[in-house]
Image (cartoon, rainbow, N blue to C red):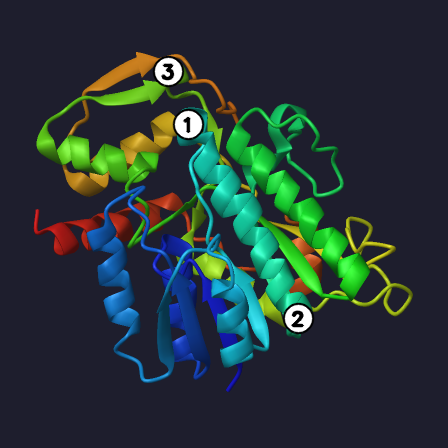
Amino acid sequence: MTRVLVTGSAGFIGHALSRRLLGDGHAVTGFDAFSDYYDVGLKRARHAELAASPSFEAVEARLETPGALLDTVARTRPEIVVHLAAQAGVRYSIENPRSYVESNLVGTANLLEAVRAHPVRHLLLASTSSAYGGDAQSPSRETDRAVTPVSFYAATKLATEAMAHSYAHLFGVPTTALRFFTVYGPWGRPDMALFLFTKKILAGEPIEVFSGGSATRDFTYIDDLVEALIRVMDRIPAQPGAGAPVCAADTLSPVAPYRLVNVGGGRPVRLDRMIDTLEAALGRTAQRISLPLPPGDVSATRASTELLQALVGTVPETPIEVGLPAFVRWYRDFYGV
């Protein structure tokens, strides 16, 4: 049994990862603030499912509260920490940037101080494909320059990557930062397009389609992402001079036990194809309103998966023709529609 601390355990990815860890026989401490950025009831329902396991302990607190993370880490002594808690959302970061400073920057700094005081075997840190910003290539490789973020959300995530690298260098904290690409599936986030589209189509309301549906996203099914995280946990970056790169695309730092890894499928899907597939799963036709791409968004994302595969082997890639109907079934069951 491995002791794992998961921050953001009531969130979409945190819940799915915690459920998998508990199912595999590990002990999980879930740390979450239950912020009201989206439906708190959904977050409570996720945690209630996890609480059915005697190996799960819930801690309700904010990342930025002085001492909250330090006390939790000191008491539970996790061997692995997966830092998923953050203020998410590209567009909301334009409206309320302070919440991103407090949660993403101050909160991550508090976590780094906690694992500095009480060392862990491996720290996994969630980042985002948005970090590639205006420099984005296709596919986006971890070795690409990423210095032109086009949203404040992306800027804070780039900052947390740099902060974690500095702690890995200064204090020897083995760290893997992971850039996630458009994660979706059952128990998903209500602020994301799939959830919003489903809700509006079932209600007979029009949906807003940016760039006429030509924008592409590297959709990553939640179970595939969790499988990748589980495998990466055991791929601990070596201390400087103690290990060789696993491939030409490796981002293993020359001065720290630190690595940056994409987690995505590498097979982008046009937004209009996603909507077509969703319509088929719902048995409804959407009323589409075409709008220009909003500020902070990018027109396309596509992950290079070379490094991920070199580290952990081939990770499952669930096609949207399977993943979207699975989401729809969960949505109808959970909301009774």
Q: Position of residue 307 (x, y in %)?
A: 70, 53
What is the C-alpha distance between the residues marked 1 and 3? 19 Å
Q: Residue 325: image x %, image y %?
A: 26, 48
Camera-side residue of 317 and 55: 55
Residue annotated with mark 3: 212
- What amino acid is labelled 2 in the image? Ala
Query: Compared with residue 151, is residue 318 higher up or lower down, i.e. above or below?
Result: below
Left or right: 240 in relation to 316 = right
Q: Residues within 10 Å of mark 3 (few under 14, many from 20)?
A: some
Residue annotated with mark 2: 117
Q: Earlier in the sequence, mark 2 or mark 1?
A: 1
Q: Which of the two marks, 3 or 2, is nearer to us in this view?
A: 2
Badge 1 amino acid: Arg
Dot 3 lies on which element? helix
Residue drawn at (88%, 70%) of the image: 242
Of callouts 1 and 3, which one flags the residue occurring earlier in the amino acid sequence?
1
Q: Residue furthest front?
A: 66
Instruction: Identify the residue position indicated by label 1 in the image.
Output: 91
Of discs 2 and 1, which sits in the foreground? Answer: 2
Q: Report helix, strand or loop for mark 1.
A: loop
The percent position of residue 116, horizontal first and vertical second, equals 68, 67
Q: Is residue 189 visible?
A: yes
Q: Mark 3 vs mark 2: which is more N-terminal? A: 2
Please provide percent x and percent y for residue 207. Answer: 23, 24
Q: Amino acid at mark 3?
A: Gly
**In this rendering, is residue 235 above or below 185?**
below
Q: Which mark is residue 52?
A: none
Q: Quadrant of residue 173?
A: bottom right
From mark 2 to mark 1, how far is it between C-alphas? 35 Å
